[in-house]
Image (cartoon, rainbow, N blue to C red):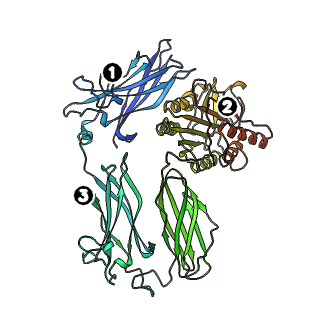
Amino acid sequence: MKKILLLFALTLPLWAAAQSVTFHNTWMEFDVTSGGEQGMYFHFDFSVYNCWGKDLYASVFISDSKGNWMSSRNDAYKSKQGSVYGTKKITTLSDSDSHWNDLKIFIPYSAMSVPQSGLTYKYTMVVRYTDGKDIKQSDFYVFDWASHGYSARYSTPKPTAIFEKAWVEFDVYSDGEKGMYFHYDFSVYNHRGKEIKASTFIIDSDSKWMPSNNPTYESAQGSVCSTKRITTLTDTDSHWSDLKIFIPYSAMSSPERGKTYKHTMILRQSDNTDIKQSDFYVFDWAGHAPNKKSNYYNYDDCDKPGIEWLSKYESSSSSFTVKAGIMSDSEITDTEIAVNGSYYRGMSTVKNDGYQMMLNQTVTLREGVNEIVISATNYCGTTTRKSMVIYTKSNDDQVYGQKRVALVIGNAKYKSSPLVNPANDANDVASALRNLGFDVRTVINGSLREMEDAVTDLSNRADRNAIALFYYAGHGIQKDGVNYLVPIDADPQVAADVPYVCYDVNRLLANMEESGSSMNIVVLDACRNDPFGRSWSRGSSDRGFATLDISGATGTFISYATSPGKEALDGDGRHSPYAEAFIKALNTPGLELQYFFRTIQADVKKKTGGAQVPWNNTSVTGDFYFNPK
């Protein structure tokens, strides 16, 4: 991805009462994806002065070298004059001049008219009030669209694929047959929402295709072939991290000693037009030593267990039953199931040789792709089988009923005042939220830029049907009545630097409100102490967090780890007192939102002997259950 960086001189703000804007820096990115569309990000570093607490619009426009504004092909990105533009609503700080060090504005290629060869293009930002009155327009910044090869963005590119990895698994079972799994990692581009066929073929060292003994696994030319139909994604290029294609031994001719064997995958469209064929991958069939019990090759005379997956690969419920058959010639001594790294143990084992053990274990899925790993052990060793199950929440889901998105941040590795528990708190809170159906993104030891990008991502993932949750564990400070979250790279030299190196909680609320989500839940396990307080002269009124005004934000719930003006404890164990109580409440069924946080309040107060009492602020009117079961 190509970036164009345009730097220009930093101008000091004038100390005048008139509203003004200073543009410090700008750059752009080509070929980024937002909302399922490919386009450009325009980045700006700028400051607004003497416009405290106001809502503004920052808008980007594109002009050509003839002085014409580029016209728009999409009403969502069309100005009143018909030109293409991207806009973002921003809110200035209520007590200080406001600075944005990376405001990103997106314009998709689909909204732009086709750029003309021979012309150069440039962009500009206009900052204006919500009533349309301009405050200031930036310079025009040229961007190198011509050398970017823009014409390809406005034609229909041919579908293609990239094969990244392939491997073979011997002696696996499927539908009661023993055979091989051929595994592939690959991506398909420019073929969104289409059904395609992935087929595996085998060739020997004489360049002959292996003939088939089974019509089910036979190509039109009579060679061994196994095909799986797959569907590409509708909103992005598609990737498969482990597509498995099975061929039973019964369908293959007996391999010959002295020959090597290779496999290849061919991706075809539904009309049998080839998209791409992979390389030929050698697999060590000859070194797969003869087995006494068959004509096919095995590693040695001792067979590890065989595992046959019997469940589906998709689910509309977070509660999913893993069904698998385990085949073994000797006693099974241990079995194990891991779902996204969480283990289920204690299942019964086979007591006599030759018994086919059946696993039937209910597990909890998170929304999206889930990795399920089954392991079985006998005298000869352990066999592991990995499968991917996609959980897509249905509209009539009786457990959750709404889209759930979350961002969890844990900052601990500060240079001046490191903390012990925030990383543990963040990881364990994220895991508990995933178990309750949240799409969770996690940032551990985040810089200011990483925190800003993560909050923008949360806003992009949320919509009017979503419950959006933000959880922060780490240092937090208050300056002049404004609350700030402290990134690990913050190093203010004086108190006046705080608004520029720390993250303003008001910006967080503005981003979440702008997403239009039906409910916003903000949890601030911060104020553990002020990492910079020793070097500044501060009044006691600046201790802890100040209460946020959410009177104009319907559907917002804010929970502070401690009461206003107080400091929260980091904790002596794995978690802070607040995080420990929060995770406990998440795992408790039937707690309505208000009672959920009252329960946390009581637990923290009791655990700390009254030294820490959480504080809640809400404008929520409806009911919500994290864990309704």
The residue at the far left in this view is 118
Q: Residues within 10 Å of mark 2 (few under 14, many from 20)?
A: few
* Residue type of the residue flagged with mark 1: Lys
Marks 2 and 3 close (CB-CB < 8 Å): no
Front in this rendered view, residue 220 or 441: 220
- Residue type at tag 3: Asp
Apparent side of residue 465 relative to residue 185 in the rendered image (left or right): right
The residue under label 3 is: 271
The image shows residue 121 at horizontal and vertical percentages of: 27, 30
Q: Disc 2 and disc 3: Cα gap in Å? A: 69 Å
Locate the N terminus and report the quarter of the image it occupies.
top left
Locate residue 382, reporting x and y percent. 54, 73
Q: Nearer the viewer, mark 1 or mark 3?
A: 3
Disc 1 from disc 2: Cα separation: 50 Å
Is residue 9 visible to us here? Answer: no
Whole-number angstrom distance, CA of label 1 to CA of label 3: 45 Å
Q: Secondary structure at mark 2?
A: helix
On residue 533, the disc is 2
Q: Earlier in the sequence, mark 1 or mark 2?
A: 1
Q: Is residue 447 visible?
A: yes
Q: Mark 1, residues whose alpha carbon is within 10 Å: few (<14), some, or many (≥20)? A: few
| Residue placed most toward the observer, 434 or 64 | 434
Q: Does dot 3 land on a helix, a strand or a loop?
A: loop
Q: Which residue is mark 1?
A: 80
